Every structure is written in C-alpha cells, then in structure tokens.
Image: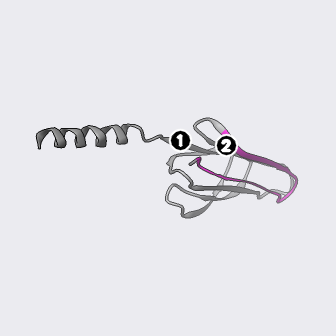
Amino acid sequence: MKVVSILLIIVAMAATSCRKEYNVRYKVSCASCSLTYSDSGDNTQQHPADGDWSLDFEGEPGQFLYLSAQNELASGSVSVSITVNGDQVDSATSTGGYVVATASGSVPE
C-alpha cells in the first residue's frame, strides 16, 4: 500500500511540474487613448492611458486575448501588441485622429 501511495505522489508531482506557464503581455503606445482589453480572468476592462502602458499576467491554455486602443486626439497614432512567452501573437498600429488599433488571439493549447 505504501508503494502505491508513493507512486501516486510522484505522478502528481510530475504532472504539476510539467504544467507550462504562459506569460501574457499587453503593450500599448499612445499619447492619449482609451483601452479595452480582456484580463487574466476573461473580464473586459476599460480605462484611459497616457503614454506607454503594459499589463503582464499568467494566461491559461486556450484563453482568448484581446486588446484595443482608441486615439483620443485629433491626430497621432496608437500601437498595440500581444505576446505570449515573448512570442508575438498579434499587433496593430493606426494613425490619425480618433483611430482604433486592435489585436487579438489566444494562448496556445
């Protein structure tokens, strides 16, 4: 019985240590913009940003990723990007007054 218990503990520890981590990073560059994004809990968040902005969180396999920024000025540009473990998932740049840049994707399975 002890051998079975020990084997179960080893298998559980191996399964836990094999779990891959997915480090998600959202990045925005703008002078003044309004952000909309899905957070680590799959909730939609909205708030303003002035200048460079970023958010890092641990994603789950298959999790939907979304980031959008709207320029709040009559001229200028907005850039958005999403990376997972340093690999670019999507990016976009828009130039002009009140334009929107949107990036989306998902965490690998």
The dominant secondary structure in magenta is strand
Q: Is residue 95 visible?
A: yes
**Residue to which mark 1 is pinned:** 23
Residue 27 counted in the magenta span = no
Residues shaded magenta: 88-108
Give x and y (percent) for residue 33.
Answer: 72, 55
Front one among 87 and 103: 87
Residue 25 position in % (x across, y down): 59, 43
Gap in Å between the C-alphas at discs 2 and 1?
19 Å
Which one is nearer the viewer's eye here, 49 or 40?
40
Q: Residue at x 49, y 59 (%)?
A: 41
The number of callouts visible is 2
* Residue kind at label 1, given as amino acid type: Asn
Q: Residue 70 in the image: x percent, y percent?
A: 75, 58
Find residue 14 and report its horizontal and vertical position in percent.
Answer: 34, 37
Name the residue tied to disc 2: 52
Q: Nearer the viewer, residue 16 or 83?
A: 16
Secondary structure category for the residue under label 2: loop
- Up/down of 20 relative to 97, above or below: above
